[in-house]
Amino acid sequence: MIRVVLPHHLKTLARVEGEITLSLDAPVTTASVLDKLEADYPMLRGTIREHQTLKRRPRVRFYADREDISHEPPDAPLPEAVVSGREPFIVIGAISGG
Amino acid sequence: MSGTRVLVGTRKGAFILSSNGDRRDWSVSGPHFAGWEIYHAKASPVDPDRIYVSQTSSWFGQIIQRSDDGGSSWFQPGSPDGLKTNDMGMPMGESNNFAYDTSEETGKPLTTHQWYDGSQHPWEFARVWHLEPSLDDPDTVYAGVEDAALFKTTDGGASWFELAGLRGHETGPNWAPGAGGMCLHTIVIDPNDHDRIYAAISAAGTFRSDDGGQTWKPVNNGLHSQYIPDPTAEVGHCVHRIAINPINPDVLYMQKHWDVMRSDDGGENWVEVSGNLPSDFGFPIAVHSHDPDTIYVVPIESDSLHYPPEGKLRVYRSRSGGNEWEALSNGLPQEHCYVNVLRDAMAVDEHDPCGIYFGTTGGQVYHSADEGDHWAPIVRDLPAVLSVEVQTLP
């Protein structure tokens, strides 16, 4: 199971508390995690990545096993710690005031 | 007319202020969508319990919310019956998909507009500034967005499509952003001819469609803007807000970046009616619901100083359709007041006497139940107010 941590506002939008768990087949990548996340929680479409291009929104970042993977290719395999569920895949809003 | 419902959008959520027709005692609900910017909330005139909300975030993008019960509960439209995507009944997630039309069929879809420095810049969707529900159908709504374009839904907000004839107008490459971005912020539907629609864009100007939004033409003749290379150009004017005379819809009023203007011929020609205003810079303009020669503005010091002249918050009223103005200050702060009133943050109800409402960047929502003669705050300490709409309920 893949553990996903969302920022406050997206948890509110998805009507969840705490972490989300996703069941995914290998290979587990940023793209496959987000595909499954948006399939299970369609209201999150367009909030993490753009509708048309599927590019990460500029003020959203992804962390995996304590590394910033925001600029890694979306189809790159995620670390084993995330794949095994030991560490979460974290979606975070950039810290930029307000 | 026994009810009054005020829909307030703020930097950190939406609030609903409710009263009866007397408008003395108010109840407050909210924040709805706490922490999100609520650029606009507006109800359908056909179904007053149908409310549409533009919920936005620079981080997480655009969300459309809808209530079918007057704001007691909300959902993101997009979950047609029988088409829910999972066991939790989550919506389809397309209600926030505002994709610019790039098809050949629409003529000449533009890919760039003018940027602040005069260079060309790609059209990029940022947010919905204004939602204008149809006068006929509760499922039909127009949306004005940044970067400037007009979208429409006919399925209650579940999906949106662009009316690309506006953005495809040949002047498009000359449109430029104002300080708040290049936004289509005002949509006005002629109450006598619902195919006649006006749209105002900062900084492009006012456009009119006579065929339900398929084709458009600029209607800016008479505007004079010293901040653009050609002060009387066809487009490039920073129109802040337009309002329509509900009795004679050929009469329109405009608060421009500078100048208060009036048109008596559906926007074909404009004349200045700033008259004796202490400043003709401002953002909102509103028309009395029963006496359409009576109009309201809130003068602001200047384009550089976005606060009231002399630190005194005053609404100005003209009972002659412009030129002669009187200050309305009874109940408003008359010292040390440096708030602004944004373009979508003023509204009138349909009670008799007519009520006037406005919200400030300081978080106050003021109202007058007697056409502006006396004012009182409904709430004082909300987040900065972005929009105010009022419903007169049966």
Image (spheres, coloured by chain):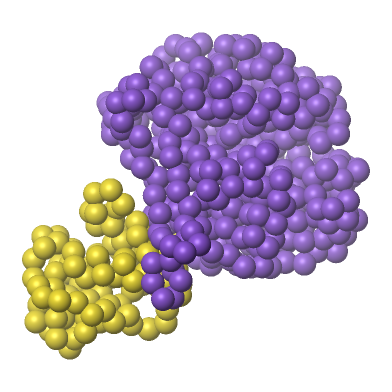
Chain colours: A yellow, B purple
Residue B311: give x, y in percent of width and height: 68, 44
Task: Please identify the residue farthest to the bottom as the structure is shown.
Answer: A86
Q: At which x and y percent is residue B372?
A: 84, 42
Quadrant for residue B99, please give it: top left
Residue B340 appearing in the image = no
Which quadrant holds residue B272? Answer: top right
Q: Quadrant of residue B324?
A: top right
The residue that appears at 69% across and 13% down in the rendered structure is B265
Left-right relation of B5 to B129: right
The residue nearer to you, when weighing B160 against A87, is B160
From the viewer's perspective, is residue B129 above or below residue B234?
A: below
Q: Is residue B319 left or right of residue B366?
A: right
Rendered residue at 21%/84% (across/down): A1
In the image shown, does B120 or B136 lie closer to the viewer?
B136
Residue B69 can be seen in this image: yes
Up-down relation of residue A98 to residue B341 (above or below): below
The count of marks equals 0
Q: Is residue B70 left or right of residue A22?
A: right
Residue visible at 80% across and 49% down?
Answer: B392
Q: Which one is nearer the viewer's eye here, B227 or B63?
A: B63
- Measured from the top left, where is residue A57 in percent x and y? 28, 55
Q: Is residue B342 above or below residue A62?
A: above
* Residue B196: percent from left, percent from top: 62, 24
Residue at point 41%, 20% (across, down)? B169
